[in-house]
Image (cartoon, rainbow, N blue to C red):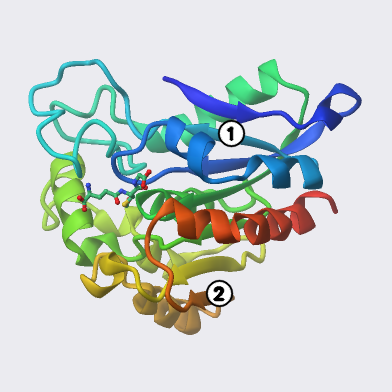
């Protein structure tokens, strides 16, 4: 598994906190490095940023390259239970356990002081990693996340393939809108960004209002920043990534 890591210069003198970034469909670790513009903010706020790939690669599992929204580049941050995916497609465990261990063993970071953010499929990933592991991350944020995957075409296709049919497997355990209803942990505010001109919002792949409604019922705080005129792209992400890093830094530098 490849990942990117940005190390600000302060790391030569002291241990620093970490922000994990989870990318969206079709991305490798390169998209965030090349397009987000996050590095100058990581330097300004003194945080390490780690950005993993979005799936295992090079396994040549039958069908793993047939779709841009399933298989390679589309691991969906779940632990698969279905053949032929279940041996390797365990992105949830990779991100929340193995990767954290690799980073804390090999870099000068403050163990246990970390936040998570992501985009689209990776926004869904960031939300479920935080909601399923109360206290593991100090804060969570997302750009245009897939908020209710059980109810949108991208999510249903991925869950069906990796987890099995909805009738016989527990999709709710992997869906932020369902997880928020049963969240039981330290106070956690969901910090969400959404471009108002995002075509995937219009196509009902993202469903942020479902998450907002669930948060209201569960009394989990949520901030939804609607950005007029912005789409789903990395141009949009690069416009607001500084705000997200500042937000996380407020929790990580306490
Ligand atoms: N091929 C698709 C579009 C794929 C796409 O837009 N991917 C997004 C994430 S979407 C949700 O997870 C992305 O981040 N792309 C990489 C980039 O560098 O922009 C289509 O044709 O619609």
Label number found at residue 214: none
Residue in the picture at 10% in, 51% down: 165
Query: In which quadrant of the rendered image does the N terminus lie?
Result: top left
Query: In which quadrant of the rendered image does the C terminus lie?
Result: bottom right
> Which image quadrant is residue 25 in?
top left
Q: Relative to residue 217, is residue 89 drawn left or right?
A: left
**In the image, the residue with mark 1 has its CB under 8 Å from the nearest atom of ligand 1:** no
Camera-near label (1 vs 2) is 1
Decide which of 210, 14 is in the foreground and name it: 14
Asked if 201 appears above or below 76 in the picture, the reply is below
Q: Is mark 2 on a helix, strand or loop?
A: strand
Decide which of 18, 218 is in the foreground and name it: 18
Residue in the picture at 71% in, 28% down: 7
Q: Where is residue 117 in the image (x, y as percent from the top left)?
A: 54, 51
Q: Where is residue 187 in the image (x, y as percent from the top left)?
A: 66, 66
Residue in the picture at 58% in, 41% down: 20
Q: Is mark 1 on a helix, strand or loop?
A: strand
Q: Relative to residue 207, is residue 165 drawn left or right?
A: left
Decide which of 192, 110 is in the foreground and name it: 192
**In the image, the residue with mark 2 has its CB under 8 Å from the nearest atom of ligand 1:** no
Asked if 172 appears above or below 96 in the picture, the reply is below
Residue in the picture at 53% in, 35% down: 33
> Which image quadrant is residue 68 in?
top left
Residue 85 visible to an observer of this rendering: yes
Q: Neighbour class for label 2 at 10 Å: few (<14), some, many (≥20)?
A: some
Label number found at residue 222: 2
Q: Neighbour class for label 1 at 10 Å: few (<14), some, many (≥20)?
A: many
Labelled pair 1, 2 in contact (Cβ < 8 Å) = no
Residue 131 visible to an observer of this rendering: no
Q: Position of residue 114 (x, y in %)?
A: 68, 43
Label number found at residue 50: 1
- Residue most extreme to the right: 13
């Amino acid at each position: 598994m490849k990942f990117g890591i940005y190390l600000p210069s302060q790391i030569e003198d002291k241990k620093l906190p970490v922000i994990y970034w989870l990318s969206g469909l079709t991305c490798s670790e390169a998209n965030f490095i090349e397009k987000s513009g996050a590095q100058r903010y990581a330097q300004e706020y003194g945080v390490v940023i780690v950005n993993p790939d979005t799936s295992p690669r090079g396994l040549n599992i039958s069908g793993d390259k047939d779709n841009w929204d399933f298989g390679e580049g589309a691991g969906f941050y779940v632990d698969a239970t279905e053949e032929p995916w279940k041996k390797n497609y365990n992105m949830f465990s990779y991100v929340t356990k193995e990767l954290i261990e690799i980073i804390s063993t090999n870099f000068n970071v403050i163990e246990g002081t970390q936040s998570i953010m992501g985009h689209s499929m990776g926004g869904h990933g960031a939300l479920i990693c935080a909601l399923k592991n109360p206290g593991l991350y100090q804060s969570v944020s997302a750009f245009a996340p897939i908020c209710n995957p059980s109810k949108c075409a991208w999510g249903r296709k991925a869950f069906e393939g990796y987890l099995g049919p909805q009738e016989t497997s527990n999709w709710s355990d992997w869906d932020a809108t369902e997880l928020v209803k049963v969240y039981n942990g330290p106070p956690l505010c969901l910090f969400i960004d959404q471009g108002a001109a995002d075509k995937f919002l219009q196509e009902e792949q993202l469903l942020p209002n479902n998450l907002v409604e669930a948060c209201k019922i569960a009394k989990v705080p949520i901030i939804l920043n609607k950005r007029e005129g912005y789409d789903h792209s990395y141009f949009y992400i690069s416009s607001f990534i500084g705000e997200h890093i500042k937000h996380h830094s407020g929790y990580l530098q306490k």
